[in-house]
Image (cartoon, rainbow, N blue to C red):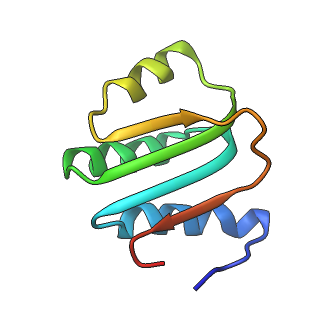
């Protein structure tokens, strides 16, 4: 079931959603910002060979973060020029 979140709840539920993903994880957001905790969770999903798709519209990533993402085999990123919405889901939704 969809959850509509305010800003303060988004980080908490995003972490929980990533942690709970067992087969697939899709993250769609205009802005791609990866804090250390999100990076740790994504690296763990990559290690477990979980299919992760990240779609973003504007990148504020540093070159080393882009290299880090490219080094993760099971995480695929896509750029969508006019993206204005956020949607985070795993196989349970």
Is residue 47 shown left or right of residue 72? Answer: left
- Residue 88 quadrant: bottom right
Is residue 28 shown left or right of residue 52? Answer: right
The percent position of residue 41, horizontal first and vertical second, equals 38, 51
Of all residues, the one furthest to the bottom in this rendering is 1
The percent position of residue 55, horizontal first and vertical second, equals 57, 43
- In depth, the one of 55 and 59 nearer the eye is 55
Q: Quadrant of the N terminus?
A: bottom right
The tally of labels here is 0
- Residue 19 quadrant: bottom left
Who's the residue at 38% across and 46% down the image?
42
Q: Is residue 84 above or below residue 11?
A: above
Q: Is residue 30 above or below residue 63?
A: below
Who's the residue at 48% across and 40% down the image?
36
Who's the residue at 27% across and 54% down the image?
50
Q: Is residue 11 above or below residue 80?
A: below
Q: Is residue 64 above or below residue 36?
A: above
Of all residues, the one furthest to the left in this rendering is 48
Is residue 77 shown left or right of residue 75? Answer: right
The percent position of residue 39, horizontal first and vertical second, equals 43, 41
- In depth, the one of 19 and 28 nearer the eye is 28
Who's the residue at 53% across and 13% down the image?
63
The percent position of residue 54, horizontal first and vertical second, equals 51, 44
- In depth, the one of 78 and 44 nearer the eye is 78
């Amino acid at each position: 079931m969809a959850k509509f979140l305010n800003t303060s709840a988004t980080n908490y539920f995003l972490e929980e959603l990533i942690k709970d993903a067992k087969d697939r994880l899709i993250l769609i957001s205009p802005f791609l910002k990866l804090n250390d905790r999100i990076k740790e969770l994504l690296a763990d999903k990559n290690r477990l060979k979980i299919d992760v798709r990240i779609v973003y519209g504007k990148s504020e990533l540093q070159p080393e973060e882009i290299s880090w993402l490219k080094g993760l085999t099971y995480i695929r990123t896509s750029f969508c020029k006019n993206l204005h919405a956020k949607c985070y889901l795993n196989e349970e939704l």
